[in-house]
Amino acid sequence: MRIIAGEFKGQRLTVPRDKVRPTSERLRESLFNALGEELVMNSLWLDAFAGSGAVGIEALSRGAQHVLFNDRDRFAHEVIRSNLERCGVSTGFTVLQKDVFVLLRDPPASFASRPLGVLFLDPPYDFGRYRKLLLKAIDSRLVDHRTLLVLEIFKKTKLEFIPEELYVSRTLKGGDSHLLFLSQE
């Protein structure tokens, strides 16, 4: 796995073994093409189930101001730090090891100044608590009506979990995954 474009283009990343299903390069490329430079440049991101950190590092590579990487798994946390170091990223990030619901309820104070531009959610395919996750996200002080929520799900997942407060503005398909772009009504 490698970074596709930007400052860290071509850098190879380590992927945590067994426990992580990283977002494919092709789907990441589709994601960033769909977002466009304007939405990424100088934005704040939360890569909430960061795994290898590939999505967040790609955002930094393409000009995001700051990325908050979070994964509750200790090994994934170490891999994220290693990948940031491997790419030569020394600023513009925070790495946490928290349960996502705790993080959304009590985010770092340093993120209080302005809402996220993008909240990227890539839970395990068998997560099962999508509705609760999305409701907690939109109730978080990290998110406002301008924040784009991007949720990666298994392609056969039924969308019955989407709260009424959100609508799917776009869907990207790649392999076994779909990326849902969710916005507030």
Image (cartoon, rainbow, N blue to C red):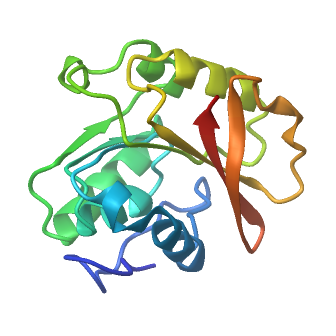
Q: Is residue 127 above or below residue 87?
A: above
Q: Residue at x 33, y 54 (%)?
A: 80
- Give the x, y percent position of residue 123: 63, 43
The correct choice, above or below, for 48 with respect to 143 in the image is below
Residue nearest the viewer, comparing 93 with 137? 137
Q: Residue furthest bottom?
A: 10
Classify 97 as above or below 105.
below
Q: Is residue 155 left or right of residue 3?
A: right
Q: Residue furthest left?
A: 90
Q: Quadrant of residue 175?
A: bottom right
Residue 47 percent across, percent down from the top left: 43, 45
Picture residue at 45% right of the left edge, 49% below the top: 50
Q: How many marks?
A: 0
Q: Nearer the viewer, residue 67 or 184?
A: 184
Horizontal side of residue 112 vs 146, given as left or right: left
Front residue of 107 and 17: 107
- Identified at 78% across, 68% down, the residue is 176
- Can you say which quadrant of the picture contains the C terminus? top right
Q: Position of residue 33 (x, y in %)?
A: 48, 73
Residue 64 x %, y %: 25, 55
Name of the residue lying farthest toward the front: 185
Left or right of residue 59: residue 161:
right
Residue shown at 22% from the left, 63% from the top: 63
